[in-house]
Image (cartoon, rainbow, N blue to C red):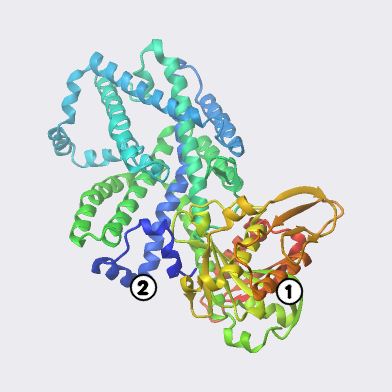
Amino acid sequence: MERHAADEELSTYQLEQPITSSKGIWFRQLLDRHKFLRNGLLIVVLLGTCMVIGDGALTPALSVLSAISGIRVAAPHLHENVTVAVACCILVLLFGLQHIGTRRVSCLFAPIILAWLFCNASIGLYNLITWNPSILKALSPYYMYHFFKVDGKEGWIALGGILLCITGAEAMYADLGHFSPKSVKLTFVGVVYPSLLIGYVGQAAYLSKHLDQVDHAFFKSVPNPVFWPVFVIATLASIVGSQGVISATFSIINQCMALGCFPRVKVVHTSNHIYGQIYIPEINWIMLILCLGLTIGFQNTVGIGNAYGIAVITVMLVTTCLMTLVIITVWQRSIFLALCFFGLFGSIELLYLSTAFFKVPKGGWVPLVLAGILMLIMYVWHYGTTKKYEFDFQNKVSMKWLLNLGPSLGIVRVPGIGLIYTDLVSGVPAIFSQFVTNLPAFHEVLVFVCMKSAPVPYVSQHERYLVGRIGPKDYRMYRCVVRYGYRDVRRDEDDFENQLIANLVEFIRTEEAMSSNAQSFEGDQHLTVMGTTPALLSNGHSVKEMETDKSVAISNNESLQSMEWISPPTSLIPTRRVHFDIPVSETVDSDDVRKELSALAKAKEAGVAYVMSHSYVKAKMSSNFLKKFAMDYMYTFLRKNSRDPAMILNIPHTSLIEVGMFYHV
């Protein structure tokens, strides 16, 4: 997708410091010059992303099984299969209720986690005082040096066994998008870190006097009077932690789809009031199958813990690498400072990663296999989507050819509005010429609609629409770019058609006044930010829905006070009638504006058709075997089994026109 100067005018984009120093510009130019560097950076990012998505299957299995296995401390005679069966039942219940959402129970999450941290700290303090207060000496760096000096290689390998002690740290910073950095830092430093530190010190004090009770050390260190309350809180905390990772997985996949790095899947919004609460059915059931497979396959937390440790330390290392780039390009600090940062944190993470790979035969292979499969899917999808866009960009219709056709475009202009969906934000797509070549007729009003992902997290409603004109006024051709951030939730908006028409009306009325502020793209049209839609809908427009089977009606056509329309009626499905009021302009519309608005109203009365490309993507005959296999089989398979774009955009089937297009990339 093309990037333009208009995106840099977004309010959320301006929150970031622009790249002005020679360091940031130098690195960006380096990426632009070398394609292999861009591919390498993409692979690194996909690796970290796939490992995080893999956590969505590993965390619930590990958390729930480790909590439930504590019951064997109170009932040693209980068979291991019983705990596995109970853990599987909880996992089925957890994933089975995802479609409901968490809006009714989310208020309990914070108290449960606080209770769990309080239990950790209290039990740790009790064990520290009761069993071995002198264990605090272990916090001295001298004992760390002594440990490696005495144990040598065995001590180095033992580092892989303590990865799970630090795996909760990175999850705190995944919440930066929902909370301020200051609140996350205060919570971690003031609550989470002290609680976990006291808990681990207490377990160490207990184990120093009970060397034969390493298995289930936490539950064995819990005093008998409080065992069952702690067991219940631990189980609830494991469910809350699992829910957090599952929700994060849904959010990450939704963002990857917006960036063109994941096949299209169904996204369900579970809350009308809380922004961003989503549910993805296909991913939910795949994660459930993986969780059950891991739980039944390993039947203990050792193998799953080894897998989880490798996934987490890999994510940490990738984060450090990307943070090094941020220091140079975004913060515009010296390369020396960035290398010092990577040398400090990267060396520690590489040390842990080197020891974690000793666990690969003992379960550590799981995240590597999951990440490999996910990376292959995401890279092939991104590659195929990019090649398809490049084909569209290179084969778009020239404006000179279009202008030479005249206002009628050399075809019959029939009443109605045609919405042509395209990935291009400039120029006329090849789908248009393909359509008129085979069927030399088109609608009186043409609107080229582009759903664009902007390089910002969110795009506010008043900045979402860019509207422009293609060709002279009598051509009745417009372009509308609808911008979304990669964290925006694209709802199935029933009023998208209303908003589009409202923005066209406002653009027509204010075109001359706003022409000086318009943004130009490749010289074929000017796109203007239209930010009045929310105000129009709330102050001057009324949108009413009612079940009816009446025909389309339009009232007071001359003054354009009101338009009513419905989707084409069917015999089985009651149609939806929408009433849309165009408010009277504060200034007197000119004759040309009234004429154009009248033509728009008549076209809307005739109906709206949606034109989309039905793509067939194939590799060129001259391509190598690897590219042919990736495009002809893998990408084609993913496209056939991903969600149809018309369903994602909530386009009515009776108004959809699909144009077949062959892409030889």
Whole-percent x, y for residue 414 in the image:
77, 75
**Which quarter of the picture shows residue 405?**
bottom right
Tell which residue pokes out farthest to the right in this image: 571
Per the rendering, the mark at residue 32 is 2
Q: Is residue 16 left or right of residue 487?
A: left
- Separation of disc 1 and disc 2 at Cα? 41 Å
**SS of the residue under disc 2:** helix
Q: Nearer the viewer, residue 648 or 558?
A: 558
> Residue shown at 29%/32% (left/top)?
193
Does label 1 or label 2 sit earlier along the sequence? 2
Q: Which quarter of the rendered picture does the C terminus lie within? A: bottom right
Q: Nearer the viewer, residue 194 or 110?
A: 110
**Which quarter of the picture shows residue 40?**
bottom left
In contact (CB < 8 Å): disc 1 and disc 2 = no
Residue 61 showing in the rendered view? no
- Give the residue number, with chain letter if any, for mark 1: 443
Q: Is residue 548 above or below residue 126?
A: below
> Residue shown at 77%/53% (left/top)?
577
Q: As shown in the figure, which amino acid type bears the numbered disc 2? A: Asp
Q: Is residue 20 left or right of residue 601?
A: left
Q: Is residue 40 above or below residue 233?
A: below
